[in-house]
Amino acid sequence: MKSNQKHLALILALSPISSLASSDTILPPRIWEGWSISTEINLITDHSDGTYNDINGVAHAYNESNNLVSLGISKGGWSLGVSTFENSYFERSNMISIERELWNFGGVGLVGGVGVVTGYDVNILRDDTFFFGDTLVTPLLGVEYHSSHLSLGEFGVVPKIRMMGLDTYMLNVELTYNFEQ
């Protein structure tokens, strides 16, 4: 299954969950008040350097297409997410992250957080000091744009520019369902 087909399948899989959760028959409506669920996909990835060196000093090109897919829940400016993606070194990685909206003006928000990521090869020489074996603890920083023009009822599309770690930049899009306020 191609990456875009996987993303579409994930979005379609979330649709029944959002309608069940908003139904009064499952839980009282006030339980869901102010919560949102989302899925985020990566469109473009770039690194500040084009290559990295392995432990033998051999240069390799970074992965610039990480196929990130994320699921998240949010409330009150806080978000908790789980992600899977192909990391910069072409290895499968999984991340759990927590983020907080730090600033918002006119729908443009600055978001900061931290992620714990698994799946890194310990034999790759890295300049970052946040690695512990095959696990990375990474700062997350992003700018996102919330607009009523990109929403249809409770569903919204949120473009995001993200920085993961110290040298990875991404353009992502988040599809969000906001439970009744």
Image: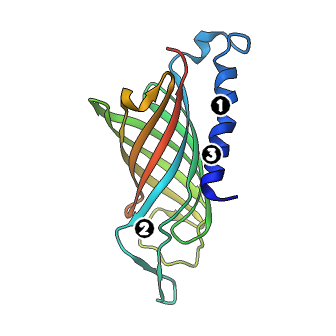
Q: Real-space Cα distance between discs 2 and 3?
A: 34 Å
Q: Secondary structure at mark 1?
A: helix
Q: Quadrant of residue 150?
A: top left
Name the residue tied to disc 3.
8
In this orientation, which residue lies closer to the viewer: 75 or 107? 107
Q: Secondary structure at mark 2?
A: loop
Q: Quadrant of residue 16?
A: top right
Three-letter residue code for mark 3:
Leu
- Comes first in the chain, label 2 or label 3: 3
Three-letter residue code for mark 1:
Ser
Foreground disc of the pair 2, 3? 3
Identity of the residue drawn at 46% across and 62% down: 130
Report x, y in % for residue 121.
60, 72
Identity of the residue drawn at 46% across and 45% down: 173
Q: 10 Å neighbourhood of mark 3: few (<14), some, or many (≥20)?
A: few
Report x, y in % for residue 136.
53, 60
**Is residue 48 positioned above or below 34 on the image?**
below
Name the residue tied to disc 1.
15
